């Protein structure tokens, strides 16, 4: 199939999606999600962040689809939206060091007696810092960093919207970043 055929098919899907055809938009998502995930993973090196960026990309695309010119190819437009979302995440990362993730290694067992003792001491310090958090924040940190649940799983488990979970997780991490116990490991 020629490149022109792909653009024509894309144009057809975009036109149908603009007209409110949900299946057409889902086809666009299914077609371009793998490429956008690959782009986000290369830039962010975090599956969770990449997933969030791609999801945000399609939300923004859906909201702005009415202004999109159906004669243009959609891939570059989606890639540009995705890159803008990646830049936003990178900016957030730069200004918000996640201290808990930087000391997560302390939760694993060491090989020597000395490493196990040091790990035990650090785990106790981390638990003291966590105990200072309000219950909902502590609960989310435990689910995310100890049980290794993603945001969607936490939201389902707590029956809360994903946005609420992300907000609570951000606030919990910000509180932990200010804790002098964890600052020593940053």
Image (cartoon, grey):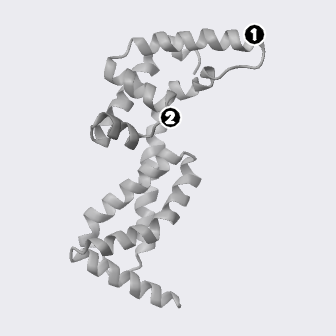
Q: Quadrant of residue 12?
A: bottom left
174 or 108, nearer to the observer: 108
Q: Secondary structure at mark 2?
A: loop
* Cα gap from disc 1 to disc 2, whole angstroms: 27 Å
Q: Is residue 34 above or below residue 47?
A: below
Q: Quadrant of residue 168?
A: top left
Q: Is residue 31 left or right of residue 112?
A: left
What residue is drawn where x is 30% and y is 41%? 163
Q: Is residue 29 above or below residue 163?
A: below
Q: Is residue 99 above or below residue 39?
A: above
95 or 111, nearer to the observer: 111
Q: Extreme front residue here? A: 157
Q: Earlier in the sequence, mark 1 or mark 2?
A: 1
Q: Is residue 98 visible?
A: no
Q: Extreme right residue here? A: 112
What residue is drawn where x is 29% and y is 64%? 62
Q: How far across and down, in percent of the image, does residue 101 sit?
A: 54, 29
Q: Is residue 99 left or right of residue 154?
A: right
Q: How far across and down, in percent of the image, does residue 53 sit?
A: 43, 52
Question: Dot 2, crowdedness within 10 Å: few (<14), some or many (≥20)?
Answer: few
Q: Is residue 124 visible?
A: yes
Q: How far across and down, in percent of the image, does residue 185 sit?
A: 59, 18
Q: Is residue 123 left or right of residue 74?
A: right
130 or 59, nearer to the observer: 130
Q: Quadrant of residue 82?
A: bottom left
Tell me how many marks there are.
2
Q: Is residue 142 left or right of residue 39?
A: left
Q: How far across and down, in percent of the image, does residue 7 sit?
A: 43, 84
Q: Which mark is residue 114?
A: 1
| Residue designated by label 2 | 148
Q: Are marks 1 and 2 in contact (CB under 8 Å)?
A: no
């Amino acid at each position: 199939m020629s490149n022109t055929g792909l653009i024509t098919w894309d144009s057809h899907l975009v036109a149908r999606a603009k007209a409110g055809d949900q299946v057409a938009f889902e086809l666009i998502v299914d077609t371009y999600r793998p490429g956008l995930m690959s782009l986000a993973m290369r830039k962010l090196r975090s599956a969770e962040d990449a997933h969030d960026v791609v999801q945000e990309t399609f939300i923004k695309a859906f909201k702005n689809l009415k202004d999109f010119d159906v004669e243009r190819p959609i891939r570059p437009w989606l890639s540009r939206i995705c890159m803008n979302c990646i830049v936003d995440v990178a900016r957030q990362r730069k200004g918000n060091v996640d201290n808990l993730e930087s000391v997560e290694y302390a939760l694993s067992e060491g090989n020597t007696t000395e490493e196990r003792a040091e790990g035990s001491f650090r785990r106790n310090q981390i638990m003291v810092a966590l105990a200072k958090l309000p219950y909902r924040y502590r609960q989310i940190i435990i689910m995310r960093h100890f049980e290794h649940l993603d945001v969607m799983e936490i939201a389902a488990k707590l029956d809360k919207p994903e946005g609420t979970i992300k907000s609570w997780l951000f606030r919990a991490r910000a509180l932990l970043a200010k804790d002098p116990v964890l600052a020593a490991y940053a």
